[in-house]
Image: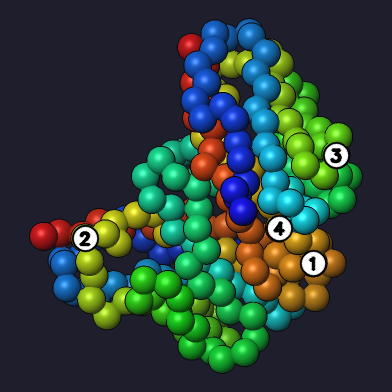
Amino acid sequence: DAGVIQSPRHEVTEMGQEVTLRCKPISGHNSLFWYRQTMMRGLELLIYFNNNVPIDDSGMPEDRFSAKMPNASFSTLKIQPSEPRDSAVYFCASSSLGESRNYGYTFGSGTRLTVV
Amino acid sequence: AQSVTQLGSHVSVSEGALVLLRCNYSSSVPPYLFWYVQYPNQGLQLLLKYTSAATLVKGINGFEAEFKKSETSFHLTKPSAHMSDAAEYFCAVSGRYSSASKIIFGSGTRLSIRP
């Protein structure tokens, strides 16, 4: 099992540009979570999906952020336009629906985003 | 609603000394509790979990945690620290009877090991 795969590992972009982060969950997992980690705010849940359907997006900071999960094996987190305060490490995690309570999540290695 | 509070954003111990990382939880329903570890430039890894069986839970790398309902605590311990234990540790909680699969993380405790 390759685990949760995120791409790119590092992204540097200029303010105002569109940024797309990608995630491939573990095969068979049907819950997917996007987190943002910063020194100031710690680990924040942005949005999560069950069976490709967004369940809770209350953590999405503002309209510049959007997330999609077109199928069970792929999700994107898009920031448009990007701002320097969006600089952070973005993590994707997946689990089996209803089983995360028992087994927790499996996290990807993260995407380090720097907006200059 | 569930939440966790980790006491101490940074803990430093000597190699070979006892490691104690504190976590208190708040939950309106019986909780599931987790400890995760994050090494530099990596994602979070599950260290151990409490899901209602034994209150003393053993995890990987010699860590263990004890669920104490009366104290609403789930502190993480290791008898003898090793240099490789230096990392960020996160306590997390999920509601046992909640249909949602969301897990709430604490703010993290950075563990440093002195030679």
**Which residue appears at 59% of the width and 16% of the height?**
A83
Residue wearing tag 4: A95
Tell me, yes or no, whether the two marked residues, 2 and 4, touch with CB atoms within 8 Å: no
Q: Quadrant of residue A101?
A: bottom right
**Which residue appears at 54% of the width and 38% of the height?**
A110
Label 1, secondary structure: give it.
loop
Chain letter for the residue marked with disc 4 in the picture: A
Label 3 or label 1, whichever lies nearer to me, is: 3
- How far apart are the alpha carbons under marks 2 and 4? 31 Å
Can residue B18 be seen in this snapshot? yes
Disc 1: CA contacts within 10 A as few (<14), some (14-19) or many (>=20)? some
Disc 3: CA contacts within 10 A as few (<14), some (14-19) or many (>=20)? few
Disc with the residue nearer the chain's start (3 vs 4): 3
Report the side of B104 relative to A42 (left or right): right
Tell me, yes or no, whether the two marked residues, 3 and 4, touch with CB atoms within 8 Å: no
- How far apart are the alpha carbons under marks 2 and 3? 42 Å
Label 3, secondary structure: give it.
strand
Residue wearing tag 3: A71
Residue wearing tag 1: A98
- Give how far across and how far down residue A108 sits, in percent: 57, 45
Label 2 or label 3, whichever lies nearer to me, is: 3
Nearer-the-camera pick, B97 or B44: B44
Report the side of B40 relative to B5 (left or right): left
Nearer-the-camera pick, A108 or A113: A108
- Give how far across and how far down residue B105 sits, in percent: 57, 57
Chain letter for the residue marked with disc 1 in the picture: A
Can residue A59 be seen in this snapshot? no
The label on residue B83 is 2
Amino acid type at circle 4 is Ser
- Give how far across and how far down residue A33 sits, in percent: 70, 47
